[in-house]
Amino acid sequence: MERPFDIVLFGAGGFTGALTAAYLARAAGPGVRWAVAGRDRAKLARLGLDVPILVADAADPASLAALARGTRVLATTVGPYVRHGDGVVANCAEAGTHYLDLTGEAEFVDRTYVRHHHRALRSGAKLVHACGFDSIPFDLGVLHTVTKLPEGVPLKVSGFLRTSMRPSGGTLASALSVLGRARQTVAEGARRRAAEVPPRGRTVSSLPGGPRHVGGGWALPLPTVDPLIVGYSARLLDRYGPRFTYRHHYAVRTLPRALATAAGAGAFAVLAQLPPARRLLQERLRPGDGPSPEQRARSWFKATFLGEGGGERVVTEVSGGDPGYDETAKMLAESALCLAFDDVPDRAGQLTTASAMGRPLIDRLHRAGIAFTRRS
């Protein structure tokens, strides 16, 4: 049956959601049928967009079912996803609706696979997590690198991130949620490993890298969701070779900066385990708060990838402006347009940006100003 919308953006009243809605208003052509959705109609009306407004709440299953049945693609910015995301993805899997989110929560990614992957396979839905700064620069950056290396040989890729950005309240809430649920994350990962069939005749390893001195600077372990996403792409795509290894790092220029960064990250992780400290941190930056346009204009990111295999070596980069918000809004919106209108691989179930869209999304993002380049 024909659905009334090509794309619905759920959570458009939030900080990142509003930026994504504004980007869609600029990028979607006149033939794109799209709408914004959220629980507060008045807040959505204040966006000033000439598109339909749909009222839905993550705590209202009937409203989520109606959203999923009414669109071909549903993109959601309503997080933390481990608390607010399961109903949305469940209804998309049931309705055969393609689903996109911005999660950086490994627990939610693994839980979605266990609960909803096989239902999405049957319905034809593509369930694609991490369609923002988590984890498009790394997932598509590794794919871009792999395609520059020989086929059918073991491949090794190392990623190094440099960035300057300010967090929003929503990002802080998600980070605190992840760090405060370490036990649940480990348990959900174990359930996913028990349920997932590994690729036949191929091995994949993707982890945060160890501390190392490289290229005149220092590389530190970066324990984000990105290696999990890259590893899943490698398990789905034979192009990554018979033995694929990925290591993920944060790069800084000097040893004092490396020590300060490691100490700060460790302190934040410890505080996130303590409920009073978690509440105090969240009160300093509430969901809905975020950096100003001037602060975002000064933000940037650069992800560098060193790929090796078959006797060849390549260095590639993915770079852009404000990673947490302006570029994340662009990535999510372009992912939705790509799934709705581009010639993408014929796959279903839980996927990644590399396996669900791949080169068509790289091309879209490159045209939109996120650079995918080769240095050597």
Image (cartoon, rainbow, N blue to C red):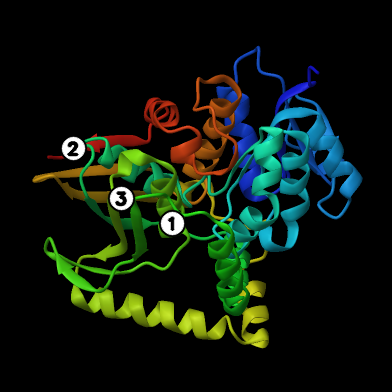
State the residue at coordinates (34%, 51%): 202
Q: Is residue 145 visible?
A: yes
Local secondary structure at mark 2: loop
Q: Residues within 10 Å of mark 2 (few under 14, many from 20)?
A: some
Q: How far apart are labels 3 and 2 at the CA level? A: 22 Å
The amino acid type of the residue labelled 3 equals Ala
**Mark 2 lies on residue:** 150
State the residue at coordinates (48%, 40%): 353
- Looking at the image, is mark 3 or mark 2 earlier in the sequence? 2
Instruction: Give residue 55's position: percent from left, percent from top.
Output: 86, 40
* Residue 90 relative to residue 177: left or right: right
Instruction: Give residue 376's position: percent from left, percent from top.
Output: 12, 40
* Closest to the observer, 50 or 190: 190
State the residue at coordinates (84%, 49%): 57
State the residue at coordinates (34%, 56%): 203
From the viewer's perspective, is residue 152 above or below residue 205?
A: above
From the viewer's perspective, is residue 213 above or below residue 240?
A: below
Instruction: Give residue 368's position: percent from left, percent from top.
Output: 42, 28
- Looking at the image, is mark 3 or mark 1 earlier in the sequence? 1
Instruction: Give residue 342's position: percent from left, percent from top.
Output: 52, 21
Q: Quadrant of residue 50?
A: top right
Q: How far apart are labels 2 and 1 at the CA level? A: 24 Å
**Mark 3 lies on residue:** 303
The amino acid type of the residue labelled 2 equals Pro
Marker disc for residue 226 = 1
